[in-house]
Image (spheres, rainbow, N blue to C red):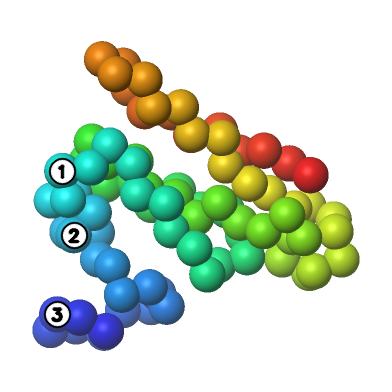
Amino acid sequence: HRGSSPSIYASIITPEEICNSGYDYIALGHWHFNCDVTCGDVKACYSGSPFGPTQNGEGGTGALVRLVPGTETTVETVYF
């Protein structure tokens, strides 16, 4: 982990790093379920896995990200 306190998350990126990144969107991986960890104006999401958390093909997810200059970044969960 980073910082002075342990994190419950497997990711090494902190909410502060997301907020201060200056990016419009950060795509995160490794988790097999979708999760929005947006911080401030920076969208940040785990897209999930097309195979789902149980790896049996049920409940799989992905992310449809729309980055259009001059508009807010949107992230839509896509189900397989």
Q: From the viewer's perspective, is residue 19 above or below residue 17?
A: above
Image position, residue 31 (x, y; %): 55, 67
**Outermost residue, top side:** 70
Distance of label 2 from label 3 (alpha carbons): 11 Å
Query: Where is residue 16, by image quadrant?
Result: bottom left
Closer to the chain start, of discs 1 and 2, is 2
Closer to the chain start, of discs 3 and 1, is 3
Q: From the viewer's perspective, is residue 61 above or below residue 12?
A: above
Amino acid identity at mark 2: Glu
Label 2 with label 3: CB-CB less than 8 Å:
no
Disc 1: which residue: 22
**Which sits in the foreground, 51 or 14?**
51
Query: Where is residue 57, by image quadrant?
Result: bottom right
Badge number at residue 17: 2
Residue at 57%, 42% (x, y): give it: 63
Categorize mark 1 by other alpha carbons within 10 Å: few (<14), some (14-19), many (20+). Answer: few
Badge number at residue 42: none
Q: Is residue 1 left or right of residue 76?
A: left
Categorize mark 2 by other alpha carbons within 10 Å: few (<14), some (14-19), many (20+). Answer: few
Amino acid identity at mark 3: Gly
Disc 3: which residue: 3
Residue at 14%, 80% (x, y): give it: 3
Amino acid identity at mark 1: Gly
Image position, residue 64 (x, y; %): 56, 35
Distance of label 1 from label 2 (alpha carbons): 9 Å
Residue at 49%, 63% (x, y): give it: 29
Image position, residue 75 (x, y; %): 48, 34
Q: Nearer the viewer, mark 2 or mark 3?
A: 2
